[in-house]
Image: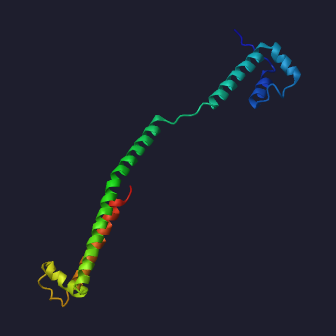
């Protein structure tokens, strides 16, 4: 069987491809399409493809299931971290409140004793036995404050780092 081709089929295909069918085509070509079976089949198939494309353009595109699953897992983990973080924040606020109450109590206690804060700081290393931490070869320091300040500064610095790392969101 020899396929039948029309000499005007290329012209009709060009108009269909550019989207000019049937508005911008001459009347003679429209009349030809009604009489020629090959050209009418070409117009029919092209119209069916255009209708299918227009219909599929209105259908929303769904994301891949893997991406949806990954986002759901990410949301679940974020919610779990937030649920875990609330008690930790409460514990941090409680620890800060306890430290402030203890500091206020120490200041009130010192105020009742006449604000001898410097003498209290000098006696604190001996009361806490910080001299045990010093090597025996070190000469005895005249004032224990010089030892107390770096130790307390180190403790405060390490405490701040621990609180920062504990409250940091990943």
Residue drawn at 49 percent across, 35 percent down? 64
* Image quarter of the C terminus: bottom left
Q: Is residue 72 visible?
A: yes
Tell me if 30 is positioned left or right of 128 in this view. right
Indicate the quadrant where residue 125 lies.
Answer: bottom left
Tell me if 115 is positioned left or right of 130 in this view. right
| Nearer-the-camera pick, 48 or 69 | 69
| Nearer-the-camera pick, 36 or 44 | 44
* Image quarter of the N terminus: top right
Residue drawn at 24 percent across, 83 percent down? 112
| Nearer-the-camera pick, 61 or 50 | 61
Q: Is residue 154 visible?
A: no
Indicate the quadrant where residue 167 lies.
Answer: bottom left
In percent of width and height, residue 7 lies at 81, 19
| Nearer-the-camera pick, 118 or 130 | 118
Taking the view exactly as shown, the residue that stands out farthest to the bottom is 142
Tell me if 20 is positioned left or right of 64 in this view. right
In percent of width and height, residue 61 lies at 56, 34
Taking the view exactly as shown, the residue that stands out farthest to the front is 112
User: Relative to 123, is 21 above or below?
Assistant: above
- What colouring does the structure picture have? rainbow
User: Relative to 6, is 84 above or below?
Assistant: below
In percent of width and height, residue 37 lies at 77, 13
Residue drawn at 68 percent across, 24 percent down? 51
């Amino acid at each position: 069987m020899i396929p039948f081709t029309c000499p005007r089929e290329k012209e009709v295909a060009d108009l269909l491809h550019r989207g000019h069918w049937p508005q911008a085509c001459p009347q003679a070509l429209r009349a030809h399409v009604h009489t020629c079976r090959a050209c009418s089949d070409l117009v029919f198939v092209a119209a069916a493809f255009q209708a299918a494309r227009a219909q599929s353009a209105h259908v929303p595109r769904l994301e891949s299931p893997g991406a949806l699953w990954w986002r759901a897992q990410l949301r679940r983990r974020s919610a779990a971290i937030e649920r875990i973080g609330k008690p930790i924040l409460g514990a941090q606020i409680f620890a800060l409140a306890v430290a402030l109450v203890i500091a206020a109590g120490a200041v009130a206690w010192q105020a009742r004793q006449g604000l001898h804060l410097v003498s209290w700081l000098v006696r604190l290393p001996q009361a806490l036995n910080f001299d045990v931490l010093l090597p025996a070869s070190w000469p005895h320091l005249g004032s224990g404050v010089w030892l107390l300040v770096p130790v307390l500064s180190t403790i405060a610095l390490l405490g701040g780092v621990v609180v920062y790392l504990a409250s940091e969101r990943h």
